[in-house]
Image (spheres, grey):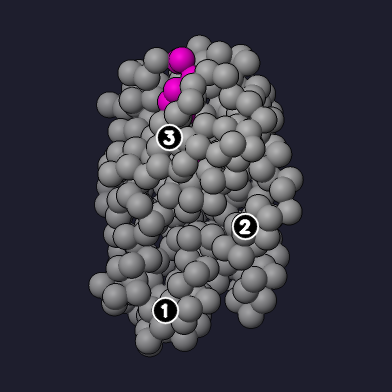
Amino acid sequence: MTLSVPFCASAQGYDAAEEVTVLMGFKAGGGSDALAQLVQPFLADELGVSFVNQYMPGATGAIAWTRLAKQVKPDGETISITNTPMLMTNYIMNESITYNISELTPIANIVTDPGIAVVAADSPYQSFADLLEAAKADPGAITVGNSGIGGDDFFTTVAFERAADIKFQKVPFQGDGPSWTAAMGGQIDASFNNVGITYPQIKAGNLRALVVFANERLPELPDVPTAKELGFDVVAGSSRGYSAPAGFPDEARAQLVDGLRRVTENPDFKAAAAAHAMNIDFIGGDDYTAFLQEQEKTFTDIWNEVKDEVQSN
């Protein structure tokens, strides 16, 4: 499945290619897709190239990122959306996954999307306290979806289980979209997801937000408490940006970084991001590399702490 963004004449320049393929490690409807649909029309205007999304779901993004690291030529024609923590936790958790971030050229982070717990609009769980009470009454019976083992939603669930001393039945999906869809359809009790992905369905009345895993209440969801407010020190989410294979041309990288910076400064883009509850968090070039390296260390430490418990389940 591909999606093209037409060439736009108002370009400010990208010399490496006239068409750029963007590898997508998750199914359409999830966080990567939402970012692509938001960013790439603006980036096409800035750079004068067309962007073609190539969807390669599976293994929590590892199929696409392995291809990016191991098979893609660093010629400026192919990049990928990269999501934390999945980009690193794939190989931290699974020795059979052999790529790592040293084989990539990080370009820029665009958004950081707080975690959220949502249920169907007609769910019997009116509040997060209701969900927790049910989980405590019958440990392991409450089904909670996530975007895949090793994703931010999975780690949020594990962190919350430890903080609240409860047990959920964790249900992995191939991306955020299938997870919230299952919750909306009543196939699972709840989905631990991300605000930017679920917000349109919350706004439309199809999903009910129970809690956000942010430091403070969000302007878009002022009535939804934070986990901290409820007594659980869990702050989590996913950052999403763009990366290329190692050896990517310096000039091409600089042009993409500058183009993405201009996009995030565009008032129309800011308005569109706000409408989708996407929190702009631009981190460009070498700063993005350092950010990913720091995330790699953080999630290595977390996994080493919880892996025995998780692997025994």
- For marks 1 and 3, the one nearer the N-term is 3
The residue to which callout 3 is attached is: 22
- In the rendered image, is residue 85 in sight? no
- For marks 2 and 1, the one nearer the N-term is 1
Q: Main secondary structure of the magenta part?
A: strand
Distance from Cα at disc 3 to Cα at disc 2: 20 Å
The reply to whether the magenta stretch includes residue 79 is: yes
Q: Residue at x 32, y 60 (%)?
A: 178
Secondary structure under tag 1 reads: loop
- The stretch in magenta equals 74-83
| Residue 204, percent from left and from top | 48, 78
The residue to which callout 1 is attached is: 206
Res 273 label: 2
Q: Residue at x 43, y 26 (%)?
A: 78
The disc labelled 3 sits on which kind of residue? Val
- In the rendered image, is residue 73 in sight? yes
- The quadrant in which residue 216 appears is bottom right
Neighbours of disc 1 within 10 Å: few (<14), some (14-19), many (20+): some
